[in-house]
Amino acid sequence: MIILGIDPGSRTTGYGLIENQPNSMRYIDSGFLKINGSALPQRLGQIFQQIESVIQQYQPQHMSIENVFMQRNADSALKLGQARGAAICAGYQAGLEIAEYAPREIKQALVGSGAASKEQVQHMVKRLLGLQKTLQADEGDGLAIAICHAQFYATEQKTGIHANQLKRRRSKRR
Protein backbone atom coordinates (compact mmCIF):
# COMPACT_ATOMS: atom_id res chain seq x y z
CA MET A 1 0.00 0.00 0.00
CA ILE A 2 1.34 3.44 -0.91
CA ILE A 3 0.59 6.32 1.47
CA LEU A 4 0.82 9.99 0.52
CA GLY A 5 1.43 12.30 3.48
CA ILE A 6 0.61 15.99 3.07
CA ASP A 7 1.85 18.93 5.16
CA PRO A 8 -0.43 21.67 3.80
CA GLY A 9 0.47 25.31 3.42
CA SER A 10 -0.75 28.16 1.24
CA ARG A 11 2.82 29.01 0.12
CA THR A 12 4.65 25.68 0.54
CA THR A 13 3.01 22.27 0.73
CA GLY A 14 5.18 19.32 1.69
CA TYR A 15 4.53 15.76 0.63
CA GLY A 16 6.01 12.36 1.29
CA LEU A 17 5.28 8.94 -0.16
CA ILE A 18 6.02 5.64 1.52
CA GLU A 19 5.18 2.05 0.76
CA ASN A 20 3.67 0.44 3.83
CA GLN A 21 4.31 -3.28 4.06
CA PRO A 22 3.21 -5.59 6.91
CA ASN A 23 6.51 -5.32 8.80
CA SER A 24 8.30 -2.39 7.19
CA MET A 25 8.06 0.95 5.45
CA ARG A 26 9.95 1.96 2.32
CA TYR A 27 10.70 5.50 1.17
CA ILE A 28 9.37 6.26 -2.31
CA ASP A 29 9.67 10.03 -2.79
CA SER A 30 9.23 13.36 -1.05
CA GLY A 31 9.38 17.02 -1.84
CA PHE A 32 7.56 20.27 -1.54
CA LEU A 33 5.31 22.23 -3.81
CA LYS A 34 6.25 25.90 -4.07
CA ILE A 35 2.99 27.77 -4.59
CA ASN A 36 3.22 30.99 -6.60
CA GLY A 37 0.90 33.95 -6.97
CA SER A 38 -0.61 36.53 -4.70
CA ALA A 39 -4.29 35.65 -5.08
CA LEU A 40 -5.45 32.89 -2.73
CA PRO A 41 -7.80 31.23 -5.27
CA GLN A 42 -4.88 30.91 -7.71
CA ARG A 43 -2.67 29.34 -5.02
CA LEU A 44 -5.43 26.91 -3.98
CA GLY A 45 -5.84 25.85 -7.61
CA GLN A 46 -2.10 25.19 -7.83
CA ILE A 47 -2.19 23.05 -4.67
CA PHE A 48 -5.05 21.01 -6.11
CA GLN A 49 -3.35 20.56 -9.50
CA GLN A 50 0.08 19.73 -8.12
CA ILE A 51 -1.26 17.22 -5.56
CA GLU A 52 -3.35 15.70 -8.35
CA SER A 53 -0.17 15.34 -10.42
CA VAL A 54 1.69 13.60 -7.56
CA ILE A 55 -1.27 11.24 -7.12
CA GLN A 56 -1.34 10.41 -10.84
CA GLN A 57 2.42 9.76 -10.87
CA TYR A 58 2.62 7.48 -7.81
CA GLN A 59 -0.92 6.03 -7.54
CA PRO A 60 -1.21 5.97 -3.71
CA GLN A 61 -4.17 4.23 -2.09
CA HIS A 62 -4.23 6.35 1.08
CA MET A 63 -3.63 10.01 1.84
CA SER A 64 -2.94 11.41 5.28
CA ILE A 65 -2.94 15.09 6.08
CA GLU A 66 -2.22 17.28 9.07
CA ASN A 67 -5.21 18.84 10.84
CA VAL A 68 -5.41 22.58 11.31
CA PHE A 69 -4.23 23.71 14.71
CA MET A 70 -5.35 27.06 16.06
CA GLN A 71 -2.75 29.71 15.53
CA ARG A 72 -2.55 33.15 17.04
CA ASN A 73 -3.36 34.63 13.66
CA ALA A 74 -6.88 33.64 12.62
CA ASP A 75 -6.23 34.71 9.01
CA SER A 76 -3.29 32.28 8.78
CA ALA A 77 -5.40 29.46 10.23
CA LEU A 78 -8.13 30.13 7.65
CA LYS A 79 -5.64 30.07 4.77
CA LEU A 80 -4.13 26.84 6.10
CA GLY A 81 -7.60 25.33 6.29
CA GLN A 82 -8.29 26.30 2.70
CA ALA A 83 -4.96 24.80 1.57
CA ARG A 84 -5.92 21.58 3.37
CA GLY A 85 -9.27 21.64 1.60
CA ALA A 86 -7.64 21.93 -1.82
CA ALA A 87 -5.34 18.97 -1.06
CA ILE A 88 -8.18 16.88 0.39
CA CYS A 89 -10.32 17.54 -2.70
CA ALA A 90 -7.50 16.26 -4.93
CA GLY A 91 -7.28 13.09 -2.84
CA TYR A 92 -11.03 12.64 -2.73
CA GLN A 93 -11.37 13.09 -6.48
CA ALA A 94 -8.72 10.39 -7.00
CA GLY A 95 -10.68 7.99 -4.75
CA LEU A 96 -8.09 7.85 -1.97
CA GLU A 97 -8.89 6.87 1.59
CA ILE A 98 -8.12 10.06 3.55
CA ALA A 99 -7.05 10.30 7.19
CA GLU A 100 -6.40 13.42 9.27
CA TYR A 101 -4.01 13.69 12.21
CA ALA A 102 -3.31 16.43 14.73
CA PRO A 103 0.30 17.64 15.05
CA ARG A 104 0.53 16.14 18.55
CA GLU A 105 -0.65 12.74 17.26
CA ILE A 106 2.01 12.77 14.55
CA LYS A 107 4.76 13.63 17.02
CA GLN A 108 3.49 11.01 19.46
CA ALA A 109 3.45 8.33 16.75
CA LEU A 110 7.00 9.05 15.60
CA VAL A 111 8.86 10.17 18.71
CA GLY A 112 6.69 8.99 21.59
CA SER A 113 5.97 12.52 22.80
CA GLY A 114 3.34 14.93 21.52
CA ALA A 115 5.63 17.78 22.55
CA ALA A 116 8.60 16.59 20.44
CA SER A 117 10.65 19.18 18.56
CA LYS A 118 10.76 19.42 14.77
CA GLU A 119 14.37 18.21 14.93
CA GLN A 120 13.35 15.07 16.82
CA VAL A 121 10.60 14.33 14.30
CA GLN A 122 13.01 14.85 11.37
CA HIS A 123 15.55 12.54 13.02
CA MET A 124 12.99 9.77 13.45
CA VAL A 125 11.70 10.14 9.88
CA LYS A 126 15.22 9.66 8.56
CA ARG A 127 15.91 6.78 10.92
CA LEU A 128 12.65 4.91 10.26
CA LEU A 129 13.07 5.22 6.49
CA GLY A 130 16.85 4.74 6.42
CA LEU A 131 17.44 8.10 4.73
CA GLN A 132 20.79 9.86 4.60
CA LYS A 133 19.73 12.95 2.66
CA THR A 134 18.79 16.25 4.26
CA LEU A 135 15.05 16.83 4.16
CA GLN A 136 13.46 20.21 3.64
CA ALA A 137 11.19 20.86 6.67
CA ASP A 138 7.87 20.57 4.80
CA GLU A 139 8.85 17.38 2.96
CA GLY A 140 10.04 15.82 6.23
CA ASP A 141 6.69 16.71 7.78
CA GLY A 142 4.88 15.12 4.81
CA LEU A 143 6.83 11.90 5.40
CA ALA A 144 6.10 12.08 9.14
CA ILE A 145 2.36 12.29 8.42
CA ALA A 146 2.59 9.28 6.08
CA ILE A 147 4.49 7.27 8.73
CA CYS A 148 1.92 8.24 11.37
CA HIS A 149 -0.85 6.90 9.15
CA ALA A 150 1.08 3.70 8.47
CA GLN A 151 1.33 3.10 12.21
CA PHE A 152 -2.36 3.83 12.86
CA TYR A 153 -3.31 1.64 9.90
CA ALA A 154 -1.15 -1.25 11.16
CA THR A 155 -2.83 -1.02 14.56
CA GLU A 156 -6.24 -0.97 12.89
CA GLN A 157 -5.39 -4.08 10.86
CA LYS A 158 -4.18 -5.96 13.95
CA THR A 159 -7.02 -4.96 16.28
CA GLY A 160 -9.91 -4.32 13.92
CA ILE A 161 -10.43 -0.94 15.60
CA HIS A 162 -10.56 2.05 13.23
CA ALA A 163 -8.09 4.88 13.95
CA ASN A 164 -10.91 7.33 14.75
CA GLN A 165 -12.23 4.94 17.41
CA LEU A 166 -8.73 4.73 18.91
CA LYS A 167 -8.55 8.53 19.01
CA ARG A 168 -11.93 8.78 20.74
CA ARG A 169 -10.91 6.19 23.32
CA ARG A 170 -7.71 8.10 24.11
CA SER A 171 -9.51 11.44 24.44
CA LYS A 172 -12.07 9.92 26.85
CA ARG A 173 -9.23 8.75 29.13
CA ARG A 174 -7.85 12.27 29.50
Image (spheres, rainbow, N blue to C red):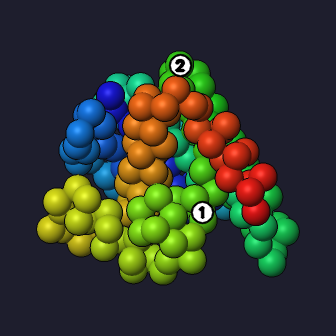
Disc 1 crowd, CA 10 A, few/some/many (<14, 14-19, 20+): many
Q: Nearer the viewer, residue 14 or 33?
A: 14
Query: Residue at image x 46%, y 68%?
Result: 112
- Give how far across and how far down residue 144 sits, in percent: 41, 57
- Give how far across and how far down residue 114 sits, in percent: 57, 70
Disc 2 crowd, CA 10 A, few/some/many (<14, 14-19, 20+): few
Residue on which the image places disc 1: 103
Q: Report the residue that reaches farthest toward the right.
A: 74
Report the amino acid beneath label 1: Pro
Disc number for residue 95? 2
Quadrant of the snapshot with the N terminus: top left
- Give how far across and how far down residue 158 sits, in percent: 42, 31
Rendered position, 15 above or below 85: below
Identify the secondary structure beneath mark 1.
helix
Q: Quadrant of residue 115?
A: bottom right
Disc number for residue 166? none
